[in-house]
Image (cartoon, rainbow, N blue to C red):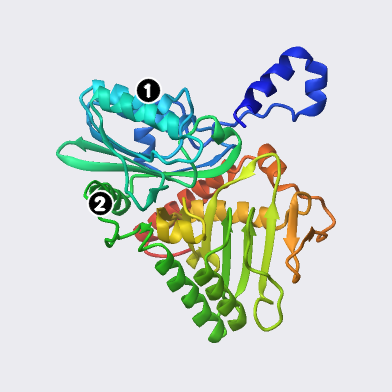
Amino acid sequence: MSYVFELYKHIEDINKLIFHKLSFNPYYPKNPKTVKEGKIIPQLKKRDFLLYYPFDSIEPFIRLLKEAANDENVISVKITIYRLARSSSIIKYLLEAVENGKDVTVLIELRARFDEANNIHYAGLLEEAGCSVLYGFEEYKVHSKVCLITRKERNNIQYITQIGTGNYNERTVKLYTDYCFITTNTAIGEDAVLFFKNMAISNLNDDYQRLLVAPFGFKSKLIEKINMEIDNAENNRPASIIMKMNSLTDREMIDMLNKASSAGVKIKLIVRGICCLIPGLPGETENIEVISIVGRFLEHSRIYCFGTGEAASIYLSSGDLMTRNTEKRVEVAVPIENPILKKKIMSTLNIMLNDNVKARKINDKGDYEKVTRGVELIDSQNYFMHDDFSVIEEENETESFFSKLKDLYVFITGFRK
């Protein structure tokens, strides 16, 4: 089907009027207001970045790689690659980093479906340039999206870790919805160091501080979180699970969700594709709601939320709840602990859960039907195209500033007004 892209261009060249009638108006991803002009690394020292493709541009991440390739304090760059664009700026800056004396390690999956030839080409190019290239495992696909930049400044080691729900493909980031999380959190950075060390020695089973790593540490942790929500429900405490993924087929996870529903946990699932769970069955799945959103962009992000309010646990992941992902692939999930970013993710999920234009729900017979709730029409993707979620971050930053100012005033004066 690769000819479709060329056909698309050809139609545009032949008759722009017909093309305009058949196609969406062009959409150009925004540069988030929270990412300022100038160097990226000093900004990351102050705050984490959360990019939401395709509504946010991939440009800040590309700028980060370019900056790292030319930063005298950067020691190494390590990255896992599953899919890339044919003309890739990411490869360009990895090669530039090698030329500038950085230690560059690339774990590339040669069995990425549809992109095998592309990845073989890039693997040869990287090896020839002097990169350390790893090729994954015989029985497990490496499907994780992790990039680790290590810096040494004034004898201090600093880690910049990027973890995403989707590929490093500059073309598909304009078509797929995905999250890109970039942080200087030391514990996450140390986990990323351990992750790449384990990949180099073919060790798939290790303990990590923050990251959940399949095939051994991902599903078990999610089951633990589900059990915690079951305990909350059984003790009359608020209990909630919200999950978003491409497909749900893992039998063990389905059984756990059924168990949670029976215990009274309120469960909302956004599953774009295959879903082997039937919601709404009395005594079994009556507390589960499943919707699928199919719109202009391919819903591709994986989000796992447990609990309510500020205490909720939120993970972004490269892995779906399919047996192939939980047991046969190397996947990584990262916890989002920053309350501002948690609020941002929950806001996007709530808008999707209220979509009544592109969403379809699964009924208790396993059939899809149109969502009829609400009076106002809500097309979640259209909403994100025209809304700037960085406003949430800016508002919270202002609140945080005044909160800190108030605390300082109380400390100095000794009393609270």
**What residue do we see at 49% from left, 41% from top?**
113
- The residue labelled by disc 1 is 92
Q: Quadrant of the N terminus?
A: top right
| Disc number placed over residue 202 in the picture, else none | 2
Q: Residue furthest left?
A: 155
Q: Position of residue 31 (x, y in %)?
A: 54, 31
Q: Amino acid at mark 1?
A: Lys
Q: Nearer the viewer, mark 2 or mark 1?
A: 2
- Determine whether 284 is above or below 3 in the image: below
Question: Which quarter of the picture shows residue 290?
Answer: bottom right
| Disc number placed over residue 210 in the picture, else none | none
Q: Are marks 2 and 1 in contact (CB under 8 Å)?
A: no
The count of marks equals 2
Q: Residue furthest bottom?
A: 235
**What residue do we see at 44% from left, 30% from top?**
117
Q: CA distance from mark 2 to mark 1?
A: 28 Å
Regarding residue 339, the answer to whether it shows in the image is: yes
What kind of element bears circle 1?
A: helix
Q: Amino acid at mark 2?
A: Ser
**What residue do we see at 37% from left, 28% from top?**
122
